[in-house]
Image (cartoon, rainbow, N blue to C red):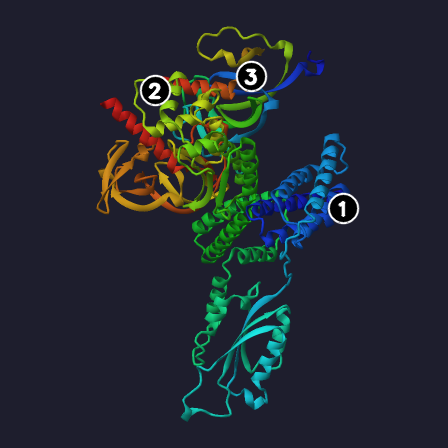
Amino acid sequence: MESDILQSQSYLTFRLGDEIFAASVLSVIEILELSKITKVPGSPHFMRGVINLRGNVLPVIDARLKFGLPRIDDTVNTCVMVLSIECEEQKITIGALVDAVQEVLEIDRKDIQPAPSIGSKYRTEFIDGMVKRNDDFIMVLDLDLVFSQDEIMLLQNTEGNVA
Amino acid sequence: MDKLKALFVTEALELIADLERVLLEFEKDLHNEESVQVIFRVMHTLKGSASMFGFDTLSALTHDLETVYDAIRDGKIIATLEILDITLKSVDHLKKVIHDPSLGNSDLLKKHHDLLTAIKKVAQLHHDEIGADYSIGKSFLATYYIYCKPSFSIFKNGTNPLFLIDDLVALGDALVLPRMDLLPDFNHMNPGECYTSFEVILVTDKPAAEISGVFIFVEDACEIIIEKISEANLLLHDSFVARMKGDHDLSVAPFGLEIVMRLAENATVTPEAKSVQFVATRVDSSSIRVASDKLDELMNLVSELVTSQARLSLLAEQHGLAELTNVSENMEKITRRLRDNAFNICLVPIESLVIRFQRLVRDLSKELKKEIDFVAEGTDTELDRSIIEKVTDPILHILRNCLDHGIESPEERVRQGKKKEGKINLKAFHSGTSVVIQIKDDGRGVDIEKVRQKAIAKGLIKKETLYSEQEIIDLIFSPGFSTADQITDVSGRGVGMDIVRRNIESIQGEVTLTSILGQGTTISIKLPLTLSIVDGMLVQIGDSKYILPLTAIDKCYEIEARRISSDLSQKHVFDGMLLPVFNLHQVFREKANEHGVIQIIKIAYEAFPIGITVDQVIGEYQAVMKPLGNMYHDQDEFSGATILGDGSVALVIDTDKLIKQLTAKVVENNVLVN
């Protein structure tokens, strides 16, 4: 189905802990420096709060916590990726807090290999595939899945049950 | 031209809505001449502009209708319900024709011809039944109050005040009342001075300018008041004349305009005269039409201005420059007024909705063969345009429920010893910062026991658990409940009530239902006045700032921090009253302040006041509401967020919902402990 033009796509890579992830640039609107985040009491732990995006309120998700990584203090490299994702046939804008944003890569569709089972460290259902780059593996993410509302609701519920 | 046509369509739709309203009014009192006048006038305007813009079909139909009402006006035809029925049908038809003036749709074309013949037939049929003394003296008479107090020295100018009065009387019918209260006693009287003043009640068809023209040469030498006090001929009202004449005591002081106005009002409180006034005010209010997106744009700009203003205030404060502070404070005042004005522009009286409701009730009651007396009160209550739009469908739904299931059939009502006509009362009023729309019927009410049975069968509640009546009634709003088909037979309510509640909650409203079995049901919808900007109080709790709506705040107290325990709920005494206090530090997981003082803010909650803890009250703040978005959909204790002067975000707390949640939590905890 997909035409040749779509074979190669641009991806933005970012770092969480020691791992590199890639997200399609089509979903990334902009990258913001970390500003003051207002927390919203009573929300799920991975929801860091809201920030002011030029007069509008943008919810920010801590990608580390969302991916099940431990929380660390923010550094000078920590930044917010403003993403436009689709969930329930609705476009919503959210911010994702990542450890550092790296570069934009052209990745050929056929270089993306299916994700192997990599144990329980990451929630693998969000991962589209993997790409080998030099000696590292980059995980290509399906953003719509990662941040879709259904997923958030699910987590919220499980959290509620635990508590 | 298309643009003009579009303009005509909006105007015509408005006229048609007007027409519908007056027709429904007319239906209640078929002898009301004023209604006929208004109906005729609206039709005339509609016909005129329709033919001007080439809506020939529209103008033709309106012309025929107009002929009928012209005849009614002249007493050649007597108005009947039959005529009214056809008129209303035609009005409905007009609404469709206006979008398809060439009658391309064959159904429409057929309907059009049917109506034309029906109207012609009606006009013919009633043509012979001429009411004997049904002619109306058409006149544009009005009653004026004139007070003329010549200066003491007026005779020196060679003016005789009596000639002025003569001139006045020549304009129409007049009641002249000389007033000699200023007459000094005989020893002090100077025969060269004028002590008499005059009060004149003048009934004339001449314009006010002509009256003032009488006094044109003596303007400097007289104190003159000329005021129209009524659109009717007050001299025909005996009570008014008698009161004005008093007991012919010439030494009484002049009544003065105010008293005369009041007398005039009292004299004319007959339904007929009232509608005259009503018409008059309608004509007088001048207004312009503005596209709604322009208003939206205006509101957006005002919101941005308010946000920038907050930033300016903060800067002025930080820099401490007296001049800057001055400017900023001045700006703040202007901003506030601009904001209030812009708000007001966006407010619409709910009257516009009520016509639709009346029509629905009228049509549906005929269809269901029920007799309904629909009364709307407080229709001048104003609400934000966007809220009105969203609340229409839920109310239509509620009314439909009322008519269909709430009100019993006439036979059943009589059997139960009720009046044959069912009553539906729609009442709108302000309550604090909210507007409440109440829909009350005197129908059969909700059978709580049946609702309970049904809910158990549906698995919504457990059989063993005890629920209060209100809790059971609330089940009507739960989604599972409404989809059941049989529920209409069971409870008489519940079809789509969950959707009603959802729609109303989406505009931050609340809907509650109370009911007495056999006596009726009351549904109250509580709505915010506006959605975009709230007057709030900026407070600090731990590291974060929050906005509390100013209207919810009753009073602030101080208390030593060490007296606040870490419990979620506690009680403290203020003003000699025990106040339940929620520890918001605990709720929001903020660092508790252990030294110094803590502020307790007393909040007016439904039945009783509640206190909440905050670290510091920063000050008043106009919060431009921004939605928190889908991500925080479940957190309805925050009605939104706002941008502060320093660019950070503060959450706006919905105190009602927050306290409701916390109370529920406390109750739950108590249950667990016990």
Q: Looking at this view, is B325 or B221 the one in front?
A: B221
Establish whether labels 1 and 3 are both on one chain.
no
Establish whether labels 2 and 3 are both on one chain.
yes
Amino acid type at mark 3: Asp
Left or right, residue B373 beside residue B3: left
Quarter placement of the C terminus of chain B: top left
Residue assigned mark 2: A163
Residue at left offset 56%, top offset 16%:
A142
Amino acid type at mark 1: Phe
Q: Nearer the viewer, mark 2 or mark 3?
A: 2
* Residue B256, placed above or below residue A31: below
Subunit ID for the residue under disc 3: A
Residue assigned mark 3: A142
Q: Nearer the viewer, mark 1 or mark 2?
A: 1
Asked whether residue B544 appears in the rendered view, the answer is: no
| Mark 1 Cα shell of 10 Å, populated few (<14), some (14-19), many (≥20) | some
Q: Earlier in the sequence, mark 2 or mark 3?
A: 3
Position in image of residue A3 (x %, y %): 71, 13
Residue assigned mark 1: B53
Residue at left offset 38%, top offset 37%:
B656
| Mark 3 Cα shell of 10 Å, populated few (<14), some (14-19), many (≥20) | some
